[in-house]
Amino acid sequence: MRVTHLSLVDFRSYELADIEFGPRVSTLVGRNGQGKTNVVEAVRYLSHLSSHRVATDVPLIRAGAERAVVRARVEKSGRSLALEVSLNAGKPNTARIGRSQAKPRDLVGTLRTVVFAPEDLALVKGDPGGRRTFMDDIVVSFQPRLAGDMSDYDRVLRQRSSMLKTAKNARGDLTMLDIWDEKLAELGGRIVAARLAALKNLAPHVTAAYAAVAPEGGECTIAYSTSLDLAATAGADSDVPSAADLGAALLQQMQELRPREIDRGVSLAGPHRDDMTITLGDLPAKGYASHGESWSCALALKLGSYEALTADDGPDAEDDGEPVLILDDVFAELDSGRRSALADRLSEASQVLITAAVAEDVPAELRGEVLEVTRGHVTSAGESTRD
C-alpha cells in the first residue's frame, strides 16, 4: 500500500498543492513553520479522519476558507484508488471513494497509516487519554467497522452523562437511565473486547521492536488495564473474554456504581476510564523510565503497530500489504544509535514519509527522494546521495 499523489485545497497553510510521491521513501525537508508536517497530517487524516496534532477539524481549514479538501491516489491490493474528503466549516464533512459519494466513515481503514511524532512521547509520560486514543486507532486499523461502535459509544456516553446530571431530580423514575445503561454496556463490551484482542496481537511486536532499538534496555511489555473483573489485567498471554461477557460485567458495574454516579453526575465505568500499561522490566515506564528509555518505548509502540498491521491476518484484513509509515520530525529527537536502529528496521518498507528540518537529520540510507518545502510550496530536490 502506498500514496502516489496528494492534492490539497485550503488545507492548513496550503491554498493549493499537488504532490507526487515516488516509491519507498520520501523526505520532506524545510524549516519549522514551512508546512512539511501539514502534508503528512493530510495523509493521516485520510486514514483516520483525525489529526495527530489537534483534536478538532477547525484548525485544518485554511484561515478565511469555508472548506478544505484532501485528495489522494492510493495503490492498494494491486489497484489504484482515489480517496477524497471535504472538511466543511459548520457543516458535515463529505467524502468520495473513486467516483462515488461515500460517508466519511467509509474512508476509515481504506488507507492504513502509522504515525510517529514528537507528541508520541506522551504515550509513555502523559495521561491515559492519549493511550486510549492509541489503542482505538489500532483497533480501527485492524477492524475498521468498529469506528462506528466508538462513535456511537461517545454519543451514548454524552447522553447518559447528561441524564446523570439531572437524575437527582428524577424522583425515583430512572427508566431512561436503565435504557442508556444497557446500550452503553453493549457498546462498551465490544470496544473493550476489541482493545484486548488488539493488544494481544500487538504486544509481542512491541517487545521485539524495543529489543531492536534498545538492546540493553530490558524488556518492554504492554497490557490492558480495566476495572472489569473479567479482564482486570488482560495482556499478550491472556484469553480475550467475549464482548457479551464484558458487556454484562460492565452493566453490573454501572448498577453498583449508580449512587456514586448520580451524586457526582459522571459515568464512572467503561472503556473511557481504562488505560494501557507500559512496563520496562518490573517497573512501570511512566515515572521510572529515563528520557531515552521513554523515547525507545514510544518508538517501539509505533514500530510494533507498523509490524503488527503488516502481518495482520484478522477477520477484516485484506491483501493490503504494509501500512504507510509516517515519521514526523522525530529524527532530531533520537540519538545516533536509535536513528540507525530505526533505519535498519525500515530498510525494506513499502512507503515511508519523513519530515525533517534538515536532510542530514535523516540517515542517508533512509532518506530516499527529498522534497523541499518552502512557505507552503513543495518541490522535488531529486534522489538523496548515499554515503
Image (cartoon, grey):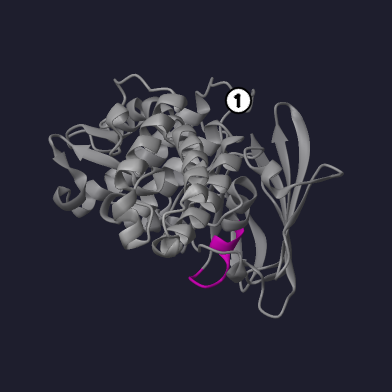
Judge left or right: residue 201 versus residue 75.
left
Residue 233, above or below 28: above
Q: Which residue is mark 1?
A: 316
Residue 123 in the image: x percent, y percent?
33, 50
Relative to 54, does residue 342 appear above or below in the rendering? above
Residue 178, how many percent across, how many down? 47, 44
Asked if the stretch drawn in magenta spans residue 38, the answer is: yes
Residue occupying the far bottom of the picture: 64
Q: Quadrant of residue 7?
A: bottom right
- In percent of width and height, residue 196 lies at 39, 30
Q: Which stretch is magenta?
A: 31-39
> In front: 266, or 296?
266
The answer to whether residue 223 is seen in the rendering is yes
Residue 386 in view = no
Residue 207 belongs to magenta span? no
Q: Residue at x 73, y 26 (%)?
A: 78
Residue farthest right in this picture: 99
Label 1 environment density (alpha carbons within 10 Å; few <14, some 14–19, many ≥20):
few
In-front residue for pair 316/161:
161
The quadrant of the rendering that contains the N terminus is top right
Dividing the picture into quadrants, the one containing residue 164 is bottom left
User: In the image, is 39 to the left or to the right of 168?
Assistant: right
Q: Residue at x 49, y 70 (%)?
A: 31
Left or right relative to 53: residue 200: left
Image position, residue 96 (x, y; %): 79, 48
Image quarter of the C terminus: top left
